[in-house]
Image (cartoon, rainbow, N blue to C red):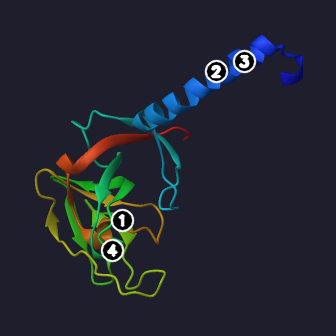
Amino acid sequence: MLKSLNRRQLFILAAFLVLAVPALSFTAPRFFCVALPPSLFHVLFWVDKDTSRIGRGDYVMFTHADKATNGKKLQMVKLVGCSEGDVLTVDTIKRYFCNGEYIGRAKDRALNGKPLRNFSWNGTVPPGMILPMGQHKDSYDGRYYGFIAKSDVKRKAHPVFE
């Protein structure tokens, strides 16, 4: 197809690409995100600035840093496993339940063999808080670092492909 274009058309195409590619690289992250670690069933999400209504079952994007991330701030996309007002319980074998529904189980060790600190809670999720969860058994999520504040959520994420 490119061979059929004359010199002027090739110049216009090249100029368009030179202008469009940088513009897209600055604007696309405001509208889409890719969740690379296999902690979720979905990989591509469109993101929404409106975080006023976040509840159980929603995907959220936030930044998290702690000892396990070596203090490095990581952007995470997780599913809200339990939200303010819900009842979160953790049993003796580290199974997590939200309003009586199983949402995951914590492990004692990470894939690299390092010990993991498990978040333990039995009661109502405090106002303004959510428990972020991955959908993979090896996801690093709220089972280990606990609740995050809804105000820390930067974007609400919506899967592009269901």
Relative image position of residue 120 (x, y in whole percent):
21, 76
Q: Secondary structure at mark 2?
A: helix
Disc with the residue nearer the chain's start (4 vs 3): 3
Give me the disc on residue 70.
Answer: 4
Q: Tell me if label 4 and label 3 are in contact, CB under 8 Å.
A: no
> Would residue 87 appear left or right of 71 to someone viewing this image?
left
Relative image position of residue 76 (x, y in whole percent):
38, 56
Location of mark 3 (residue)? 11
Q: Tell me if label 2 and label 3 are in contact, CB under 8 Å.
A: yes
Q: Secondary structure at mark 1?
A: strand
Choose between 106 and 102: the one closer to the eye. Answer: 106
The residue located at (17%, 71%) in the rendering is 122
Q: Nearer the viewer, mark 2 or mark 4?
A: 2
Q: Nearer the viewer, mark 4 or mark 3?
A: 3
Location of mark 1 (residue)? 102
Residue type indicated by callout 2: Ala
Residue type indicated by callout 1: Tyr
Q: Is residue 96 visible?
A: no
Q: Is residue 152 above or below residue 107?
A: above
Dot 3: within a 10 Å radius of its alpha carbon, few (fewer than 14), some, or many (20 or more) residues? few
Disc with the residue nearer the chain's start (2 vs 4): 2
Disc with the residue nearer the chain's start (4 vs 1): 4
Location of mark 2 (residue)? 15
- Alpha carbon separation for disc pair 4 and 1: 30 Å
